Amino acid sequence: MMIGAMVTLAVGAVLCSALATLGNQAIAREFRDFAPRKNTDILMDPAIAVRYAEYRLATNIFYRQGLVLWTVLGILGGCMLTANLL
């Protein structure tokens, strides 16, 4: 039972991490010379600002989901290791 939970968490964590990486790559490709602290004038165009915000939001959601899943996987792995050693 624990092995199934660990595999499911691992698959979910890898998928979320991969999607966050793809989102970062899309942002880097789409907005090559954009630095949020320096180039605020590019966000004056509503279409560009919305597209940038959508990319950032989606990437951050998958990044945070991946962090949670990796953390839960680590805790579950530690519990399983501890249970097997005792």
Image (spheres, rainbow, N blue to C red):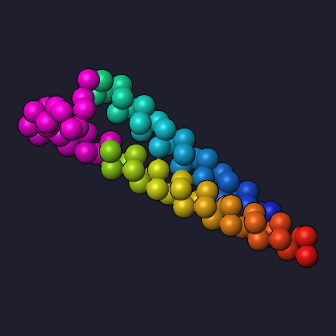
Drawn side of residue 83 relative to residue 66, left or right: right
Q: Quadrant of residue 35?
A: top left
Drawn side of residue 43 relative to residue 63, left or right: left
Give the answer, above or below, for where 23 lies relative to 70. Answer: above
**Magenta part, dominant SS:** helix
- The residue depicted at 8 percent of the width and 37 percent of the height is 44
Q: Is residue 27 magenta?
A: no
- The residue depicted at 14 percent of the width and 36 percent of the height is 40
- The residue depicted at 49 percent of the width and 42 percent of the height is 19
Drawn side of residue 48 relative to residue 31, left or right: left
**Image quadrant containing the N terminus:** bottom right
Residue 77 locus on image (x, y percent): 75, 63
Residue 43 locus on image (x, y percent): 14, 37
Give the answer, above or below, for where 5 lies relative to 7. Answer: below
Q: Residue furthest front?
A: 38
Q: Quadrant of residue 8?
A: bottom right
Q: Is residue 39 magenta?
A: yes
Residue closest to the eye, 39 or 4: 39
- The residue depicted at 36 percent of the width and 29 percent of the height is 28
Drawn side of residue 40 relative to residue 34, left or right: left
Give the answer, above or below, for where 22 lies relative to 74. Answer: above
- State the extent of the magenta-drawn residues as a range: 33-55
User: For the image shown, how many numbered marks are present on the structure?
Assistant: 0
Residue 64 locus on image (x, y percent): 46, 56
Residue closest to the eye, 23 or 76: 76
